[in-house]
Amino acid sequence: MAALRVVSKSLLKYGTVRYASTCPSKKGLVLGAYNVGDSYKLTGVADCFDHENCAVLRRNLDSANLKPGKSRIIYNPSHGYAAVAVVGLGKESACFNPAERIDEQKENIRVAAAAGAKSLQELDVDEIELEQLGDAEACAEGATLAVWSYQEWKLRQNRKKIPDIRPFKLQDKRGWDSGIIKAEAQNLVRHLAEAPANFMTPRQFAQSAADELGCLGIQVCAHEEDWALQNKMGAFLSVAKGSCEPLRFLEMNYSCGSGKPVVLVGKGITFDSGGISLKGANKMDEMRADMAGAACVVGVMKAVAQLKLPINVIGLTPLCENLPSDKANKPGDIVQAMNMKYIQIDNTDAEGRLILADALCYAAKLEPRFTLDIATLTGAMRVALGGAMTGVFSDCEELWQSLEKAGQVTGDRVWRFPLIKEFTKRMTEYPAVDVNNVGKGAGGGACTAAAFLKEFAPKGGWMHLDIAGVVGPEPDLSTPYLSKGCSGRPTRTLIQFLSQLSSC
């Protein structure tokens, strides 16, 4: 561990890899073309570039079959660029598709920008310039997400170069800057979630969050075990006691508005073995990312501060490991949550809901405008939706509609699930305790988990996001602008959601 501690100082440099050189930088350029049947139509910027460079684009494209979301590389197109990638943008008339619940124009631009950026990255360029392709924000998002990769534990000479992403003949600086901020926030989440569990412990996560957020004026407080004991967080403490690694309860406060705060709660299990109800060995290494909900809260908080949204936001992330030991929870144990309800633990691998229960109880003390929790909570959600969408449960129609709209804009969509009494009965109708952490009956596991959390959620608006399906690992999710590994979803959707609320 000591060796890892020394290396850890570089962990937060998740954006780029730099190499010292006295040679001029090698640049690439991404330009767009709309697909018109079997032909194409250059964008205005691309057409202007073509006229200035002796029709170099048309001479090369006329014999090519440029498909939507694909790129065509043209080498040495002009002085100053080693190559230009012309990308297919699909139909110029693309717009919101009600059947797919997505803005297809924006998504086409993200995919095209990613295709161009990745093809130029393979040429080992130092810098990639992109025209905004019709939407500066979507273009910046696609390119920034596409060139990122997690390579913290590789020798520097073995790392893939991450080129700078810059605009070319930019018309919408605000949109471009917003896209960069949102994409970099998602990359931060990917970075935190990919880190190995022997490094990204609760203490290290708290330190990483403080390093990322403190310089932006966000107050960060990492509460320790004594604080959890004082607040009678029996459910959270029961999970944490199975590991010798100390727990942390991270509280992050961003104040830039009036009125009650929005409270974001993220599940922070930094490694989940299942506890006494031990998981199978297959893919258990992926459980280092069981803190992706907490990572998402950190990424969202950072972007909110960088965008200077006029809103008050508090982030809460209970952090601990779920391991088997002589002190760990046992099936059949009964613990008491912060709101005094007794919980019977029939499965120690349903631990995420236990730590969230106390975090939601604590959120109630903050008198929130509304509360949103986000967690890799159930395998049932991955079965239900795969990696296509985030599953959402909500007791507020207005909040749900705003979140759904945000997902349509970002391309990272959400889908609503039922939050009805049938599932509550399965969790609460027990003679000896107030609530069970598994419940009766078979099926509907994501729904019963949400019903469990509802027993602890603050009054007023509440939403629960189950991200078990969308968190990754890629390429199982087949999102063109995300590489192999943890996805960081749905970070951009939550940022967009808060942006919409702050402008109301």
Image (cartoon, grey):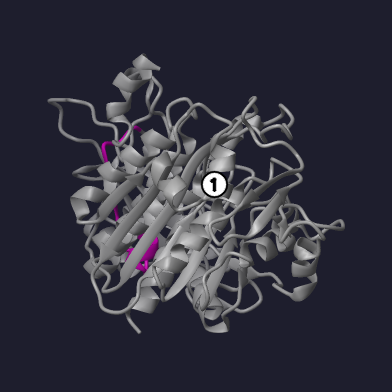
Number of dots carrying numbers:
1
Nearer to me, 171 or 103 = 103
Nearer to me, 209 or 30 = 209
Q: Identify the element where label 1 is drawn.
A: helix
Q: Position of residue 495 (x, y in %)?
A: 39, 64
| Residue with the most extreme top position | 3
Q: Quadrant of residue 87?
A: bottom left
Q: From the image, which quarter does the C terminus lie in?
A: bottom left
Tell whether 496 sits left or right of 243. Answer: left
Q: Is residue 182 above or below residue 368?
A: above
Tell whether 416 sits left or right of 309. Answer: right
Tell whether 323 sits left or right of 460. Answer: right
Q: Position of residue 437 (x, y in %)?
A: 71, 52
Tell whether 77 sits left or right of 183. Answer: left
Q: Is residue 137 magenta?
A: yes
Q: Position of residue 17 (x, y in %)?
A: 29, 32
Identity, as a three-letter code, of the amino acid under mark 1: Phe
The boundaries of the magenta stretch are 124-139
Nearer to me, 387 or 98 = 387
Q: Is residue 291 magenta?
A: no
Q: Is residue 18 visible?
A: yes
| Residue with the most extreme left position | 22
The residue carrying mark 1 is 236
Q: At 80% from the left edge and 72% from the top edge, which residue is drawn?
A: 422
Q: At 69% from the left edge and 65% from the top edge, which residue is drawn?
A: 451
Q: Is residue 474 above or below residue 361?
A: above
Q: Is residue 98 above or below residue 270?
A: below
Q: Is residue 72 visible?
A: no
Q: Residues within 10 Å of mark 1 (few under 14, many from 20)?
A: many
Q: Position of residue 492 (x, y in %)?
A: 43, 60
